[in-house]
Amino acid sequence: MKIRYDLIKNNVAEIDRSFEFEESSDLYHVKEFKGRLEKVGKQYILSGDLSYSLTSKCDRCLESATVVGEATISQVISNVEIVSDVVESDGLTDEEIDVYVTAIDHFDIDEFLREEVLLLTPGKKLCSEECDGINY
């Protein structure tokens, strides 16, 4: 879902979003993101609560595993034009100013949440902490 900056009324966009996506044979479900995108100066602040699940194969026994998670999101959002101005005037890199950079005219909330869920996913996906692995 793309949020066009010029269509945001009163400098705040309320967001209530859920969707699914696949990544390398894993099925991710953004169960719910409730938040808001608020204009502060020339930038935006995205804040809200995220809940998600992942259906994958257990890394130990290869049976189906479901991983669930929650996170609170708070992120500065800026379009590429604003960030370019800041970098030229201050000499800062994107990492130093910790800004999520978007297109000039819109913010793709689905792409942002997809990236967040992938970063939040544990390195090892287990059906349970007690899993003994493959039994022969």
Image (spheres, rainbow, N blue to C red):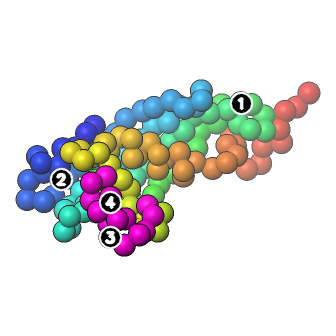
Quadrant of image for the N terminus: top left
The three-letter code of the residue at mark 3 reads: Ser
The label nearer to you, 4 versus 3, is 3
Magenta region, residue range: 80-94
Residue 13 is tagged as 2
Question: In the rendered structure, which disc, 2 or 4, sits on the residue that comes first in sequence?
Answer: 2
Q: Residue furthest bottom?
A: 90
Cα separation, mark 3 vs mark 1, equals 54 Å
Placement of the C terminus among the 4 image quadrants: top right
Q: Is residue 22 above or below residue 77?
A: above
Give the residue type that dot 2 points to. Answer: Ala
Q: Judge depth for marks 1 and 2 and give the one in front.
A: 2
Tell me, for residue 63, which label it has, or none. 1
- The percent position of residue 15, horizontal first and vertical second, equals 24, 49
In space, the residues marked 4 and 3 are separated at their CA atoms by: 10 Å
Residue pointed to by mark 4 = 83
Q: Which residue corresponds to mark 3?
A: 89
Q: Nearer the viewer, mark 3 or mark 1?
A: 3
Q: Are marks 1 and 2 in contact (CB under 8 Å)?
A: no
Whether residue 46 is visible: no
Q: Residue at x 42, y 33 (%)?
A: 20
Do callouts 4 and 3 mark residues in contact (Cβ within 8 Å)? no
At label 1, the amino acid type is Glu
Earlier in the chain: of badge 1 and badge 2, it is 2
Going from the N terminus, do you reach mark 1 or mark 4 first? 1
Distance Cα–Cα, label 1 vs label 4: 45 Å
Q: How many marks?
A: 4
Between marks 3 and 2 in the image, the one whose residue lies nearer the viewer: 3
